[in-house]
Amino acid sequence: VYRGSVKDFPGFDASQDAEALYNAMKGFGSDKEAILDLITSRSNKQRVEICQAYKSLYGKDLIADLKYELTGKFERLIVSLMRPPAYSDAKEIKDAIAGIGTDEKCLIEILASRTNQEIHDLVAAYKDAYERDLEADIVGDTSGHFKKMLVVLLQGTREEDDVVSEDLVEQDAKDLLEAGELKWGTDEAQFIYILGRRSKQHLRLVFDEYLKISGKPIERSIRGELSGDFEKLMLAVVKCVRSTAEYFAERLYKAMKGLGTRDNTLIRIMVSRSEIDMLDIREVFRTKYEKSLYNMIKEDTSGEYKKALLKLCGGDDDAAGEFFPEAAQVAYRMWELSAVAKVELRGTVQPAGSFNDDGDAQVLRKAMKGLGTDEGAIIDVVTQRSNAQRQQILKAYKAHYGRDLMADLKSELSGSLAKLILGLMLTPAQYDAKQLRKAVEGAGTDESVLIEIMATRNNREIAAINEAYQEAYHKRLEDDLSSDTSGHFKRILVSLALGNRDEGPENLTQAHEDAKKLADVASNDSSDSLETRFLSILCTRSYPHLRRVFQEFIKMTNHDVEHAIRKRMSGDVRDAFLAIVRSVKNKPAFFADKLYKSMKGTGTDERTLTRIMISRSEIDLFNIRGEFIDLFDKSLHHMIEKDTSGDYRKALLALCGGED
C-alpha cells in the first residue's frame, strides 16, 4: 500500500503543465504561487514528463529556467523536485564531496537509508550526470572504516528480506558481541560485514538476540566501540534497519529544532520521501515529538518555501488523541476542534504575477489627470496588487512624476471609496496605527476598535504598529492608550501593546495550573483579583497554550470560559477578554461575525466593514469568507453586494474575491 504524500495528478497533461509553467515565468517577476502549486501536486514521473514537454514546446531547459526565476531555499526545493530521485541523490552526493571538506552527514543519510535498487539507480545516475565513478569519488574523499562501510553499502547487495535463518541469527549476534564488547580493541570488519550485508528482517532478529545475550542494545555497544563518522554511519544503518521512517522523523526534527533550520536536510528528506513513506514519517513524528511534522514546518519556515514544504508534507496530524471525562461537552469539543483544525490561513489578495510598478503608476496618473476621475482603473490596480507591490507603486509614482500619489488620490476620490483606497495604500502597520489614533483622539474613545485591533494582532504585527504609530504621531501608542482609557481595560490594552505574548507550544502542567487559577477566581463571587488573574493569563500565554487552558477550564467547571467572562464581568473589560478568547478559538470566525454585524439590519457600519476588509485581505479573508457562509448561511460577497453601492461596492467585491 502506497505511503507517500504526493500522488499522480489525475487528468495529467504534460504540455498543458509546461505551458502553465512557461506563462508563470514569462514577463516581469514570476508567479511563484502557481509554480509551487503545480509542481508539488504532480508526481516525480509526471514532473519529468513536463520537463520533456517544455523542451519540445519551447526549446528550453525547464530546470535552467526555474533556477533563473527562483532564488534561495525555494529554488533549491523546486529544482530538487524536478529531478528523478536517483539524480537528486546523485546531485546531493556530488555536492557533499565537491570542494573543500565533505558533508559526511549527507553521505550517511543517503547510503544508510536507500534500498538495493535505489543504490543501483544512484550509481548509474551519477555516472550519467557527471561521467564519473561514484565509488572512486567516495573512496577518494573518505578514509578508514568509514570508507570501507560506504563502499560495502554502495554495492547494493544487502540480502532481501525473506532471507532469515535462525542459526545464523544467533551466530551473528555472538560474532558482533565478540568483535566488540568481549574483545580487546574492536574487530570493525565483523561489524561492517554483518551490518552491511544481512537483510533488514534478519538484522532485527540479530539485534533482539544481541540484547538478550549482552544485556544492552546494539546501539550502546556501537557508541562504546566505534568512533567518529564510522560510528555515526553504523548508528544510522541500525536506525534504518529498525525503522527508516523513525530515522527520517528524527533527522527532520533535528533539522528544525533549536535555533536556525538545516534547510538542506529538510529539503532533501521532504523531497526524497514524498513518494515513499512520508505518511509513516508523519505518524512516527507525531507520536515521538507530540506535535505534527506539519506544525513544526509551519512554525519553522516561511513564505513560498513553507507553502511548498507543507504541500509535500500532505496533512496535519495534530488530532487530539486523549480521552476525557464526561464533563467534556459540546464546548469542550469546540476547543478540541480549534486545537486540531489547522487551517492554512490565506488572504484573497495575492501579489500580481507580471507586476510593473512604473506601468501601474502611469495607469493611476492617467486615471486622475484632466477632467473627471477613472475610479474603475484605480480600483483595478489597487485591489489587484499586494501591499508590498502598492508600496513600490508609491515610490515609482514619485520617481516618475515628482508627485505624492497619496495626496493625488485624496484630492480625486471621496467618501467611503477614498477611505478604502487610501487605507489599502498604507502598510498594514500604518493602517492599524491610524485606526487606533482615530479611536483615541477627539472627544469620545472608540473602544470597539481598540479591542478589535489589540486583541487580534500577533507580536510581530504589534511591534510594527508601535513603530508606525511613533513615526506618524511622535507619541508612544502605550501612552495614548493609557491616557485615554482607565482601570482594568487600560491595563489589558497596555499589556497587549507590549506585543510580548509567549509563542511556544502548550505546556500541559502549566495549562492545568492556569486553568485552576482561572476556575478559582471565576467561582469565587467576592474575588476582586478576577480581572487581574484573567489578564495575567489571557494577555500573556501563547494561543496553543490557551486552547489547552480553556479545555482544562471546562473540565474543572463544566462551563466554557466565555460563560464565566459574561457572568462575572461587564463593559469594555468583558468585551476585550471575549475578543481574546474568540480570537484564540477561531480568529476568522471572530472577524466574520464582526463583518456580519456591520451589515445586518438597517444601515451599514462602513468604518468596520472597510477596516476589516483592508486589514484581513492579505492574511485570512479567504478563511473569513468560509466561516461567514458556515455561520450565516449566506456569502460575504452576496451581503456586500446587497448592502453597499457604486465604486465602493466594486472595490470591496474585488477585495472579497470569489462568490462562494
Image (tube, rainbow, N blue to C red):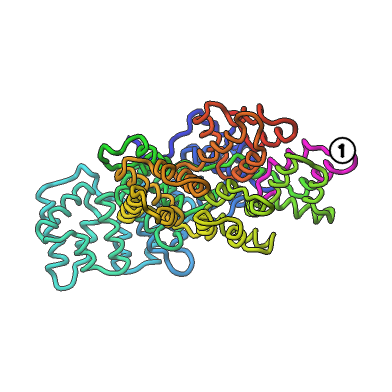
**Number of on-image labels:** 1
Q: Residue at x 49, y 67 (%)?
A: 99
Asked whether residue 303 appears in the rendered view, the answer is: yes
Q: Is 130 contained in the magenta span?
A: no
Query: Which residues fall within the magenta stretch?
Result: 362-390
Q: Secondary structure at mark 1?
A: loop
Q: Is residue 381 above or below residue 482?
A: above
Q: Is 379 contained in the magenta span?
A: yes
Q: Residue at x 41, y 42 (%)?
A: 567
- Work out whether residue 19 or residue 168 is closer to the camera in this orientation and state it: 19
Asked whether residue 84 appears in the rendered view, the answer is: no
Q: Which residue is mark 1?
A: 372
Residue 317: % across, % down: 37, 42
Q: Residue at x 40, y 50 (%)?
A: 546
Q: Please, which residue is most extreme toward the front here?
A: 526
Side of 186 relative to 629 (left or right) = left
Side of 350 relative to 206 (left or right) = right
- Work out whether residue 602 or residue 348 is closer to the camera in this orientation and state it: 602
Side of 593 relative to 150 (left or right) = right
Q: Please, which residue is most extreme toward the bottom here?
A: 184
Instruction: Report the amino acid beneath label 1.
Output: Gly
Residue 365: % across, % down: 83, 46
Q: Residue at x 55, y 48 (%)?
A: 451
Side of 242 relative to 451 (left or right) = left
Residue 263: % across, % down: 46, 57
What type of secondary structure mainly makes up the magenta span?
helix
